[in-house]
Image (cartoon, rainbow, N blue to C red):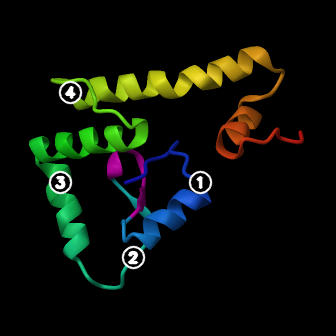
Amino acid sequence: MLEPGTRVSHAAVHLASTVGTLLVWVGEAGVRVYSSGQPGGARADKLLYQAKLALDDDLRLKVVRKMYELRFREPPPARRSIEQLRGIEGSRVRRPTRCLQSNTALSGMAVTTILKTGKKAMW
């Protein structure tokens, strides 16, 4: 569920649809649905599995820990909550961006482009 203020790239939406992940654009606190997709047709098995993982606290933490490991290629710190892991992840992601911004005169948007493509933006 993507609430107002969430930024997602076209590539991320394409990948989500390719692997059958449902994305739903909702209003604040999920009270209105503005858009959604139906990846994989009308089958609900993946959606039901995602809901099961999201609603069970232990399973959700297991998913978060696995995603952390996939992203950083190392196991996450033991005995951390989802909120603590988000904080650690945010800090790790902001560090290279801050370094690039302090060493260049690029805007935040250009820095993001460099991080994604490895090439200097042309604006």
Residue 24 to residue 28: above or below = below
Work out whether mark 2 precedes mark 1 in sequence or the reverse, and give the earlier one: 1
Q: Amino acid at mark 4?
A: Ser
Residue under pointer 1:
9
Name the residue: 34% across, 51% down.
Answer: 30
Work out whether mark 1 precedes mark 4 in sequence or the reverse, and give the earlier one: 1
Residue under pointer 4:
81
Q: CA distance from mark 3 to mark 4?
A: 16 Å
Compared across the picture, whether 30 is left or right of 16 comes to left
Compared across the picture, whether 63 is left or right of 41 comes to left
Name the residue: 36% across, 66% down.
Answer: 22
Residue under pointer 2:
39
Most extreme residue toward the bottom is: 42
Q: Which residues are magenta?
A: 23-30
Mark 4 secondary-structure assignment: loop
Compared across the picture, whether 64 is left or right of 22 comes to left
Binning the other alpha carbons within 10 Å of mark 2 as few (below 14), some (14 to 19) or many (20 upward) gives: some
Q: CA distance from mark 1 to mark 3?
A: 24 Å
Q: Amino acid at mark 2?
A: Pro
Query: Do residues under tags 2 and 1 come within 8 Å of each other at their CB atoms?
Result: no
Q: CA distance from mark 3 to mark 2?
A: 18 Å
Work out whether mark 3 precedes mark 2 in sequence or the reverse, and give the earlier one: 2
Residue 67's mark?
none
- Residue 94 at what x, y percent from top left? 55, 24
Mark 2 secondary-structure assignment: loop
Q: Amino acid at mark 1?
A: Ser
